[in-house]
């Protein structure tokens, strides 16, 4: 896993790069101020030995974040905290 710093859509971002599967590289870019995901990039190679014919690249930009509670009324409660939670996650019952 690697970490780098970039600017995405004018926002400072930290980019984490990993290899979740053989021949697959994934990059996740997070806004350094809010922690929100800004961009996801995945590159998939053809993989065979000597058969690296082409790479398939995919990029998804996440830029339209908005406060849902403000648009749907107070019935949905206050906006969620954007800080990461610590400790184990529990599933709703």
Image: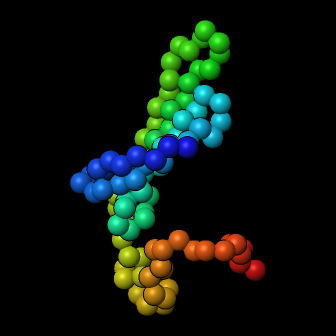
Depth check, front residue: 1 or 23: 1
Residue 62 image point, x, y percent? 39, 55
Residue 58 image point, x, y percent? 46, 37
Residue sticking out furthest to the left: 10
State the residue at coordinates (50%, 18%). 54
Q: Confirm whether residue 10 shows in the render.
A: yes
State the residue at coordinates (48%, 79%). 80
In which image quadrant can residue 20 be found?
Answer: top right
Residue 71 image point, x, y percent? 37, 79
In which image quadrant can residue 89 be found?
Answer: bottom right
Residue 40 image point, x, y percent? 46, 47
Which colour assignment does the render follow?
Answer: rainbow
State the residue at coordinates (65%, 36%). 21
Q: Is residue 14 left or right of residue 7?
A: right
Above or below, 71 against 58 in this view is below
Q: Confirm whether residue 62 shows in the render.
A: no
Above or below, 1 against 64 in this view is above
In which image quadrant can residue 73 be found?
Answer: bottom left
Name the quarter where the N terminus is drawn: top right
Name the quarter where the C terminus is drawn: bottom right
Q: Is residue 84 left or right of residue 49?
A: left
State the residue at coordinates (60%, 28%). 23
Depth check, front residue: 38 or 70: 38
């Amino acid at each position: 896993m690697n970490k780098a710093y970039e600017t995405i859509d004018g926002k400072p971002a930290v980019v984490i790069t990993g290899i979740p599967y053989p021949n697959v590289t994934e990059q996740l870019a997070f806004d350094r101020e809010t922690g929100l995901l800004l961009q996801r990039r995945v590159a998939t190679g053809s993989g065979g030995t000597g058969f690296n014919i082409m790479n398939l690249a995919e990029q998804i930009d996440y830029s339209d974040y908005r406060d849902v509670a403000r648009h749907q009324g107070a019935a949905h409660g206050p906006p969620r905290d954007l800080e990461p939670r610590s400790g184990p996650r529990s599933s709703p019952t």
